[in-house]
Amino acid sequence: MKGKQVANQLSRKGVIVNYTGPDISAGWFAIECPYCGDDPGAHLAVNEENGGWHCWRCNEKGPAEKLLSKFGIETKFIPGDGIHEMSAIEAVMGPSYFGPTPEQLMNINSMQFAQDFDAEFTHVVHNVISYKEGFQKYEVEKTPEVPDVVIEYLASRGLDDLFLLENLDVHYTDHGPMAFRVIFPISYRGDIVNYIARDITGRAKARYKVCRDDIALMPLSALLWAYDPLLNYPPEILYICEGIFDAFSFGLTRATCTFKSFLSPLQALLLNNINAGEYRIVYDKGAMEEAVKAGQRLSVICDNVSVWTLEEGIEDPGSVENPEDHIRMVCQF
């Protein structure tokens, strides 16, 4: 844990954090030592880089987690451990948040989700690719050809079918409630738990449709696009966007999306889990206010968080090639 995170957590507890003083060196801050019973002065120094600390009076020292635990603060995120998860969520959203943890959101009726997906997309005229073998023990029928209209649409968005076939498990259907849409499965720790579908005709009232909440194993507000590969291979710079095609523009291995402009506390936890070197929030130009709020929220538990905007004349990062060449920093936390 970094020193900035420690300082934020301590401040929320009402602890006075001192960055200047006669005995405070550059790169450190000082607080009253909770271990010095007879003289709890500001003798305890915390390193801003790594969160390590040492009291020069009582000689107590240790990692950031030990100090925070002394103040009754637990921040380590352990999947499946509701106490630690909720403490970390509170660090992002405050103690008034009483929502479920990611693991608690997994709908026990997974068979219903599999059957619903099977009913909608198995017997379609064209499938782009089958689901990965073993998903809920269901296999989606695949056909040898991809319709030209899908290839043309994906190409217009800067994506080729081979890339998608090998990496994204994209589907397509030409009938039912998701007709004429490409369907992107969304995974969490190896399981496909939701999906989002994008209209390819340009004539639909709703460009995107999502799986019904009563069927999805987890809601989009508790998920990130490409979370699993990013968790396994954290990028030095992670771009956080609103939509899937925005993330595609930055690259599959270094971008994710929140599916809308609001960053939920559970999504903030997932971003923290990825452990990227730097987090850059790049929303559409019309969502700058929400981007700044997302940056403020994420910076409570992550270091190196910044918000970026697009050049004049560009409204959407998904509308240009190499969008990282067309952005500038707005603020850094």
Image (cartoon, rainbow, N blue to C red):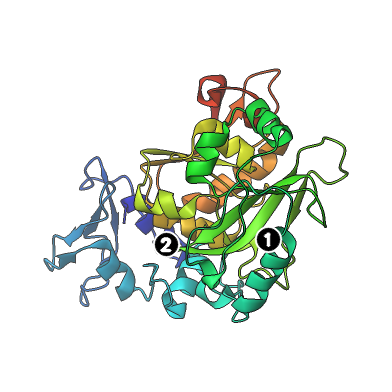
Residue 13 vs residue 154, the one in the foreground: 154
Inspect this view and state whether residue 302 appears.
no
**Residue type, mark 1 in image:** Thr
Q: Mark 1: which secondary structure?
A: loop
Q: Are marks 1 and 2 in contact (CB under 8 Å)?
A: no
Q: CA distance from mark 1 to mark 2?
A: 49 Å
Q: How many marks?
A: 2
* Outermost left residue: 59
Query: Can you give x and y, in whole percent of width and height, for residue 168 in the image?
Result: 53, 46
Examine the rendered structure and indicate whether residue 204 appears above or below residue 78: above
* Outermost front residue: 144
What residue is disc 2 on? Answer: 9
First in sequence: mark 1 vs mark 2: 2
Tell me the tag on residue 32: none
Residue drawn 62% across and 25% down?
A: 310
Q: Residues within 10 Å of mark 1 (few under 14, many from 20)?
A: many
**Residue type, mark 2 in image:** Gln
Horizontal side, residue 290 vs residue 298: left or right: right
Among the 4 quarters of the image, the one containing residue 37: bottom left
Inspect this view and state whether residue 275 appears.
yes
Residue 85 vs residue 90, the one in the foreground: 85
Query: Can you give x and y, in whole percent of width and height, for residue 51 in the image?
Result: 27, 55
Among the 4 quarters of the image, the one containing residue 77: bottom left
Horizontal side, residue 31 vs residue 171: left or right: left
Quadrant position of the N terminus in the picture: bottom left
What residue is disc 1 on? Answer: 122
Residue drawn 75% across and 66% down?
A: 212
Q: Mark 2: which secondary structure?
A: helix
Query: Can you give x and y, in whole percent of width and height, for residue 68 in the image?
Result: 33, 68
Q: Residues within 10 Å of mark 2 (few under 14, many from 20)?
A: many
Residue drawn 46% across and 67% down?
A: 88
Camera-side mark, 1 or 2: 1
